[in-house]
Amino acid sequence: MKRDMELIRTILLKVELEYDPKDRAISNLQIPGYDKYTVDSHLKLLEQSGFFDKIVWVKSVRASDSAITISNLTNIGYDYLDKIRDDGTWQKTVKTITDKGLDMSIKTISAVATAFITSATEGAVNAIIKTGGNI
C-alpha cells in the first residue's frame, strides 16, 4: 500500500465534520472511492502520528466484520488540518512539493503549507499597515 495524502486530508476533514461530542465517537468511517482496508490503514497512520485522541480497533474473526471507533482530533490533528483545509493552499502545497521533488510527508506538507499561510498573512498585514488600518 502507498500512503495517500489526499485520503489522509479527506479523513481529517470528514472526522472534523462528523464528530459529535454527544456521541463521543465515529464508528466505521467510510470514504467514497476507498475500500475499508485502505481507509483503516490510513487511520492507523494518523493514529501513530497522534492526530486522534483515541481509536478503538475491535477485531473480528472475519476482517470484513472488524469495527473501528474514532474519537475527536487532537490539537496536533486540528493544527495540521488548519494548515491544509483550504483547497487553494492544499493545491499550491501539493504542486510545490511535486515540482520541487520533495517528499510527500506530513512534516513537509505542514512546512510548505505554513510558508504559504505566512506569506499570505504578511501580505495582509502589510496592506493594513499601508492603508493606516483602513481596509
Image: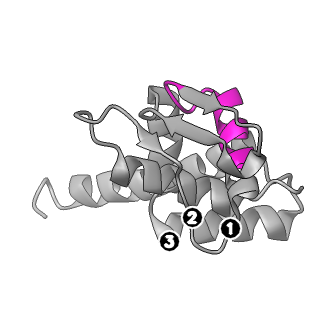
Identified at 44% across, 48% down, the residue is 15
In front of the other: 75 or 102: 75
In the image: residue 100, left or right of residue 87: right
Secondary structure at badge 2 equals loop
Q: Position of residue 2 (x, y in %)?
A: 87, 57
Indicate the quadrant where residue 91 lies.
bottom right
Q: Nearer the viewer, mark 3 or mark 2?
A: 2
Q: Amino acid at mark 2?
A: Ile
Task: Name which of mark 3 and mark 2 comes first in the sequence.
Answer: 2
Q: What residue sits right under mark 2 in the picture?
A: 31
Classify mark 3: residues with Cα within 10 Å, few (<14), some (14-19) or many (20+).
Answer: few
Q: What residue sits right under mark 1 in the picture?
A: 34
Disc 2 to disc 1, how far (Cα)? 6 Å
Q: Amino acid at mark 3?
A: Gly
The label on residue 88 is: 3
Question: Magenta stretch: dominant SS?
Answer: helix
